[in-house]
């Protein structure tokens, strides 16, 4: 059995997930970690832009942040089931 990886960039408004890993080029990875996208943190998609769904607004560690989907695709998550 294989499990497809899910990334924050693929989540929709209202989805909550647990951050599994943060990757990407070192500059982007460092910035994401400094913003609070740490392994084990819960992240929730709060809002999506109306056209093109980019950027997205997410809440992580109590902070509301805007993030481009291409950056969000470096954050691997496990979706929480309600």
Image (cartoon, rainbow, N blue to C red):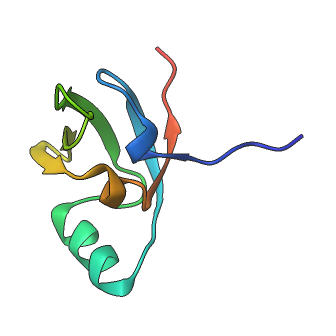
Name the image quarter holding residue 23. bottom left
Judging depth in this view, the residue of 64 and 68 nearest the camera is 68
Of all residues shown, which one is farthest toward the left? 64
Image x and y of residue 78, in percent: 53, 40
Q: Is residue 8 left or right of residue 68?
A: right
The N terminus - image quarter: top right
Q: Residue at x 46, y 14 (%)?
A: 82
Q: Is residue 43 left or right of residue 81?
A: left
The count of marks equals 0
Of all residues shown, which one is farthest toward the bottom? 26
Image x and y of residue 74, in percent: 42, 62
Of all residues shown, which one is farthest toward the right? 1
Q: Residue at x 29, y 58 (%)?
A: 37
Q: Is residue 7 left or right of residue 72?
A: right
Q: Residue at x 21, y 40 (%)?
A: 58
Judging depth in this view, the residue of 49 and 51 nearest the camera is 51
Depicted 22 relative to depicted 82: above or below: below
Image x and y of residue 54, in percent: 23, 41
Depicted 74 relative to depicted 25: above or below: above
Judging depth in this view, the residue of 31 and 67 nearest the camera is 67
Image x and y of residue 60, in percent: 22, 45
Of all residues shown, which one is farthest toward the front? 51
Q: Is residue 31 left or right of residue 26?
A: left
Q: Residue at x 26, y 35 (%)?
A: 52
Judging depth in this view, the residue of 36 and 8 nearest the camera is 8
Depicted 13 relative to depicted 36: above or below: above
């Amino acid at each position: 059995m294989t499990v497809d990886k899910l990334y924050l960039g693929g989540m929709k408004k209202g989805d909550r997930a647990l951050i599994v890993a943060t990757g990407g080029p070192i500059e982007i990875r460092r910035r994401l970690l400094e913003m609070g996208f740490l392994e084990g943190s819960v992240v929730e998609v709060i809002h999506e832009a109306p056209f093109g769904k980019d950027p997205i607004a997410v809440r992580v560690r109590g902070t509301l942040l805007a993030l481009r989907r291409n950056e969000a695709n470096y954050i691997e998550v496990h979706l929480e089931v309600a």
